[in-house]
Amino acid sequence: MKRFLLPLGLFLALASTLALGLKQGDPQDIPSPLIGKPAPAFTLTQLEDPAKSFSPQNLKGQVWLLNVWASWCTSCRKEHPLLVAFAKQGVVPIIGFNYQDQRDAGRQWLTQHGNPYQLTAFDADGRVGMDLGVIGVPETLVIDKQGRIRYKFTGPITPEQLKDKLLPLIQELKRG
């Protein structure tokens, strides 16, 4: 009987540790060291027109969303209808960030699924994405009027996430 107490005790300790780890909050709310810091300076060509470029400086003075996506991303398809509907409300500019993709595939994807973006920056090799701390797609960043990253969400945005986190933050930042 005593020989079962040690394995049982180890199992209970491991199970308790696992349970505490799972209770730590939303795994998609990954803290970023960039929160509160200026968005990295970059200039990328636009997906739709390679002769045009985009830089975060273009939106200084505005609150805006940067949505990182790719045509090969299945989770991006999940959140895309929500972004299309949200864009129609005109709450904030939504800038697309096409990450490690092929230009033609990205264009075709937007034609097929709808385009919620004011414009889309094209990061074919993912170097700028690394500066932004992109760990996967989709990711969405809220950027304030001063160009600072105020929030980062990893994974597909849900209606609840939009309503409970993003919209209140956007409204607060627009007032400030």
Image (cartoon, rainbow, N blue to C red):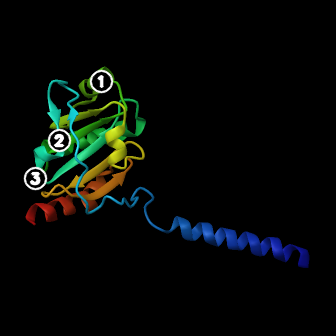
Q: Which residue is mark 2?
A: 55
Q: Kindly state the secondary structure of the residue where label 3 is placed.
A: loop
Relative to 27, residue 127 above or below? above
Q: Which residue is mark 3?
A: 62
**Marks 1 and 2, how far apart at CA:** 18 Å
Foreground tag (2 vs 3): 2
Foreground tag (1 vs 2): 2
Q: Kindly state the secondary structure of the residue where label 1 is placed.
A: helix
| Residue 125 in the image, given as x and y percentages of width and height | 37, 32
Residue sitting at 71 percent across and 73 percent down? 12
Are the residues flagged by discs 2 and 3 in contact, CB closer than 8 Å? no
Q: Is residue 163 left or right of residue 134?
A: left
- Residue 90 seen in the current view: no
Q: Residues within 10 Å of mark 3 (few under 14, many from 20)?
A: some
Relative to 88, residue 122 above or below? above
Q: Is residue 114 left or right of residue 52?
A: right
Say which mark, if any, is on residue 112. none
Residue sitting at 23 percent across and 42 percent down? 42
| Residue 30 in the image, given as x and y percentages of width and height | 41, 58
Name which of mark 2 and mark 3 comes first in the sequence.
Answer: 2
Q: Which residue is mark 1?
A: 103
| Residue 100 in the image, given as x and y percentages of width and height | 37, 32
Q: Quadrant of the N terminus?
A: bottom right
Say which amino acid is labelled 1.
Arg
Q: Residues within 10 Å of mark 1 (few under 14, many from 20)?
A: many
Viewer-nearest residue: 42 or 151: 42
| Residue 103 in the image, given as x and y percentages of width and height | 29, 24
**Marks 1 and 3, how far apart at CA:** 27 Å
**Marks 2 and 3, how far apart at CA:** 13 Å
Name which of mark 1 and mark 2 comes first in the sequence.
Answer: 2
Residue sitting at 40 percent across and 40 percent down? 75
Q: Is residue 51 left or right of residue 14?
A: left
